[in-house]
Image (cartoon, coloured by chain):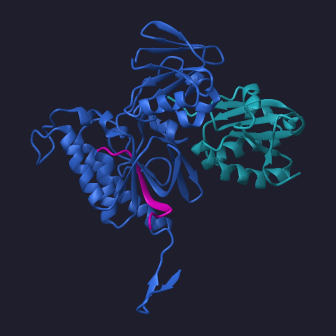
Chain colours: A cyan, B blue
Amino acid sequence: MEETVLHLTKDNFSEKTASGIALVDFWAGWCMPCKMLAPVIDDLAREYAPRGVTVAKVDIDKEMELAGEYAVMSIPTVLIMKDGEEISRYVGVQPKEIYTAALDKMLAGNVGEAAEVVSPVKD
Amino acid sequence: MVKYTHSGHIQLKVAHERRPFVYDIVVIGSGPAGLSAAITARMRSKSVAVISNLRTGSGLYKAPKVDNYPGFPAISGAELLNKFSLHAAGTGAEIIQGRVTSILPMGEQFGVSYGSEIAAAKAVILATGVVQTSLFPGEEALLGSGVSYCATCDGMLYRGKKVCVVCLSPDAEEEAAFLESIGCEVVRLTTKNIVINGEHKVASVMADGVEIPCDGVFILRPSIAPATLVPGLLTAGGHIQVDPRMRTNIPGIFAAGDCTGAPYQVAKAVGEGLVAALSAVEYLAGAK
């Protein structure tokens, strides 16, 4: 398992996310909030890849098809998947703890508890 | 870096002398609260940037007369704001125009993304003004599924598609023109009578009762709601929750002015800006 962030394309997305837990960040170079999130994703790779989580990014500038397939219409969007199925979705930048909490639940086997859709709007 | 001049004196070159890479304090908003905070922070020798949208969108700017701000009877809102702004700039605060899209804690610092830039700060003061409390029907449910607040982030996803742009801020035309330039078909809307329809993604927008089929809606208000800007920020009724020292629930983030609640008055905002700046200075002293 690699400790760096994988860069996924439409050719390897299914294969790399087919089994186990994956966290995928949809981003693009023109998106400043995405750039702000990048060090967080790097941290997650360092901490969670050794524990078996696939931490990956999709550059939607090159992979518009994948963005369409996963209905990503706002970036950054982070998906957490298990065995190829989307469990939770985070639209917009979130603090690192939000992602780690979900990954910890998934690693503990509480997939149901980890399921959530978080968007930046509340009240 | 040490450089020797002709006369043999040693000249010290400081890295990033043009602009500090990490500001001590970034203030979001250039109304009375934000500018007051900037002035006080500069007087405590902190490096300060004030990032805000065009101020011509604010209620105060449009006020023909402000009658209860001490010392300036019957001054116009625009004139008072200009005075505040000149004063803040004169103290050395950097005034930056831009739409702030998100603020993220990054270890000991905060990242503030605006337009196509990122600023880094050790502390942040939110002075974003009167809070838009009511969202359009459908806005929350479809955010990220066709509803967007950031044309520069999400525009490319709508290339060749039809989008509505709800233009409620002075910079909205710029953003709408950007969307057109990258190949979106843009319908500009200026009404606040908006309903967003769609099951799992945006299908249409009702504007003043007229249905416009589209793939996306960009909602451009003068400022993005604080809880949307800062994930995890505690708010009540849309107002940022602060203690008497203008501290929010997130260490290092402070708030002042209309965004913390009524009364929506210049004098209250200026006072809170001062308190927020002093608390930020205190936080910086402790954080070192």
Instruction: Choose between A69 and B196: the one closer to the eye.
Output: A69
- Specify whether B110 is left or right of A105: left
- Is residue A51 depicted above or below B222 in this figure? below
Q: Residue at x 32, y 53 (%)?
A: B37
Report the residue at 59% width, 33% height from top. B154
Residue B62 at what x, y percent from top left? Answer: 24, 32
Q: Residue at x 9, y 42 (%)?
A: B73
The answer, for residue A113, to whether it is visible in the render is yes
Q: Is residue B26 left or right of residue B231?
A: left
User: Horizontal placement of B71 versus B42: left or right?
Assistant: left
Residue that extends furthest to the bottom in the rendered view of this protein: B8
Residue in view at x 53 percent, y 33 percent: B151
Which of the pair B237/B92 is nearer the observer?
A: B92
Residue interval drawn in magenta: B18-31
Q: Position of residue B140 (x, y in %)?
A: 55, 24
Q: How many discs mark residues in the rendered view? A: 0
Q: Is residue B67 above or below residue B213?
A: below
Task: Please state which of residues B186 and A34 is positioned toward the viewer in this rendering.
Answer: B186
Is residue B137 magenta-colored?
no
Q: In this view, does A27 lie to the left or right of B22?
A: right
Based on the displayed image, in which of its 4 quarters is residue A57 positioned?
Answer: top right
The answer to which image quadrant residue A11 occupies is top right
Q: Can residue B237 be seen in this view?
A: no
